[in-house]
Image (cartoon, grey):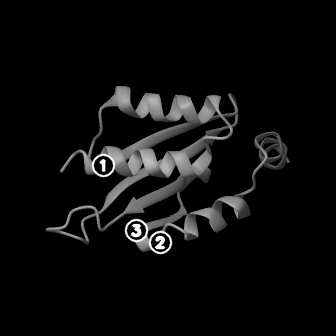
Amino acid sequence: AKKIEIEAQRGMTMEDLTKGLLNYKYTGLTFQKGHNGALDFKFTKLDHNHPDKPFTFALLLNPDTDLYELSNCNPSLNQKDIDEVINVMNADKNYGFNGLVVSMRKLFKETL
C-alpha cells in the first residue's frame, strides 16, 4: 500500500519505469529487480575496447524518507557526483529516470 501511495505522489509507476527504460536497451542498458526492492541498472557498450564490461548501480526508494537513493556503483564514482545526480532527481520530478540514466551513463563514461 505504501508503494502505491509513493508511486501516486511521484506520478509514475514501476510499469512507467519499465517502458521508459526499454527504450535504452540499444545503449546496452539492462535492469532488474534487486534486493530489498531496489532496481539494479547495468550499462554495457560504454568501453569500445571492452563492450561487454559492466557498469552498474542500484536505485532504491527509501520508504522512510520517500527519497531515492543510489548505491553499489561499480566502478566506483565520486560520491559528490552521485549525490548531485540523486539530489536533482529527488528535487525535480521532471528530471525523472531519463535524467538519471543519462547522468549515470555520463559519469561511468568519464571513468574510462
Q: Which residue is label 3 attached to? A: 27
Mark earlier in primary sequence (1, 3): 3
Q: Residues within 10 Å of mark 2 (few under 14, many from 20)?
A: few
- Between the C-alphas of marks 1 and 2, the distance is 17 Å
Q: Which residue is label 2 attached to? A: 25
Mark 1 element type: helix
Give percent across and percent down for residue 33. 56, 62
Residue kind at label 3, given as amino acid type: Thr
Mark 2 element type: helix
Mark closer to the observer (1, 3): 3
**What label sits on residue 15 in the rendered view?**
none
Say whether residue 81 is left or right of residue 13: left
Q: Residues within 10 Å of mark 1 (few under 14, many from 20)?
A: some
Give percent across and percent down for residue 94. 67, 41
Give percent across and percent down for residue 7. 78, 47
Residue kind at label 1, given as amino acid type: Phe
